[in-house]
Structure formats: C-alpha cells, structure tokens
Amino acid sequence: MKRGYIIVLVIVLAVLALFIWVKNSYNGLVKADEQVKAAWSQVENVYQRRADLIPNLVATVKGYAEHESETLEGVVEARSKATQVSVDPEKLDAADIARFQEAQGELTQAIGRLVMLRESYPDLKANQNFLELQAQLEGTENRISTERMKFNETARGYNTMVRSFPKNIIASMFGFGTKGYFEAAEGTETAPKVEF
C-alpha cells in the first residue's frame, strides 16, 4: 500500500516537472518571439522616420533645382514603393525581409541621387533647411544601421533558442519557426575601385 503511494507521488512529481519545463520553455519562446517583433517594429520606425523626411527634402531641392524633375520624381516614386512594402511581424522570414530591404535600397539610392544634386547647385548647398534635413537624414541612416543590427542580434538569439535541443521540440509543437535576417546588399562584398 505504501509503495503504491510512492509510485503515484513519483509519477505526479514527474508530470509536474515536465509541465513546468514545457511551460517555462514555451514562455521563453513567446518572450523571445515578442522581442524579435519589437526589434522589427523599431526597424520599421526608423525607416518611417526616413520616409517622413523625404517630402521636406524634395520640397527644398525642388525650389532650387526645378529642372531636375526626373530625380525628384524618382525619389517620390521610390518612397511610395518603399512605404507600400510591409512585412508580417508574425512571419519575418528571409524572403519578406529581402523584399523589404530591396524596396528600401531603391529608396536609399534615390535619396543619394537627390543629395548629390547639392554639388550642382551652390545655393542649395548653402541652404540651411537642406543642410538640416541632410543632417537628419544622415542621423536616420545611422539609426537604421543600428536598429538593423539589433534586429539581427535579437533574431539570432531567438533562432538559436528555436533550433536548440530540447527547446526545438517545444518550438515545433507550438509552431515557432526561425526568423530571417537583414543581409548585406548584393555587391557590397567587393570593395569599390578608386582610380585617380
């Protein structure tokens, strides 16, 4: 009789320990998933900041470089495309992030062409609004780089948790999948040639 109680107690304690382990593993995965989503939100936030600066920058340049309409239209079009690309924070897979990054890369190139107009227009180069907007844009680009790095670090921690044994069992049971990363743009592995 006493032996039966001990067996039941051992089984109850084993089930309780298993329950606590599953609960803690699941909650850890949920917490890590939410951290990835928060990091992604911050990435989107800084990209939105950049998109919000563009109309003011275009308006400032437009006043000095009216016949540069192709460049101005290119920036507006690239901004429009970039703001239309959205990524589901629930998925955040590599393909969606690459699509988002490509649209943002097109906008980065268009902004670069717009900022380069300052060399052709000395009055624009000296315009205080343009200089302030350019400084804000540079600061935003730095923030984008920082937030992308933080996102990658957060996603790496999450992916490690999802793929590590034995949590990978819990992750697969509850549908936790890996997240994608921001990657360097194609061609950045090759140093540019500088010729004098």
Image (cartoon, grey):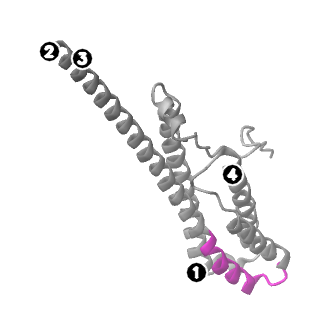
Amino acid type of disc 4? Asp
User: Residue 2 bears which disc, if any?
Assistant: 2
- The kind of secondary structure the magenta stretch mainly shows is helix
Residue at the spot 36% in from the left edge and 38% down from the top edge: 23
* Secondary element at tag 2: helix
Q: Which mark is residue 128?
A: 1
Residue that mark 3 sits on? 7
| Cα gap from disc 4 to disc 3, whole angstroms | 52 Å
Lower sequence index among marks 4 and 3: 3
Q: Closer to the observer: label 4 or label 2?
A: 2
Does the segment drawn in magenta span residue 57?
A: yes
Q: Amino acid at mark 1?
A: Gln
Callout 4: SS:
helix
**Where does the magenta region start and end?**
51-68
Q: Nearer the viewer, residue 119 or 186?
A: 186
Picture coordinates of residue 19, whole percent (x, y)? 34, 33
Mark 1 or mark 3, whichever is nearer to me: 3
- Residue 115: percent from left, percent from top: 70, 69
- State left or right for residue 81 relative to residue 148: right
Give me the disc on residue 73.
none
Please determine whether, in this image, residue 14 is positioned above or below residue 145: above
Say whether residue 67 is left or right of residue 137. Answer: right
The answer to which of 93 and 46 lies nearer the viewer is 93
> Mark 2 or mark 3, which is nearer the start of the sequence?
2
Q: Residue furthest bottom?
A: 63
> Helix or strand or loop: what does disc 1 sit on?
helix
Q: Nearer the viewer, mark 3 or mark 2?
A: 2
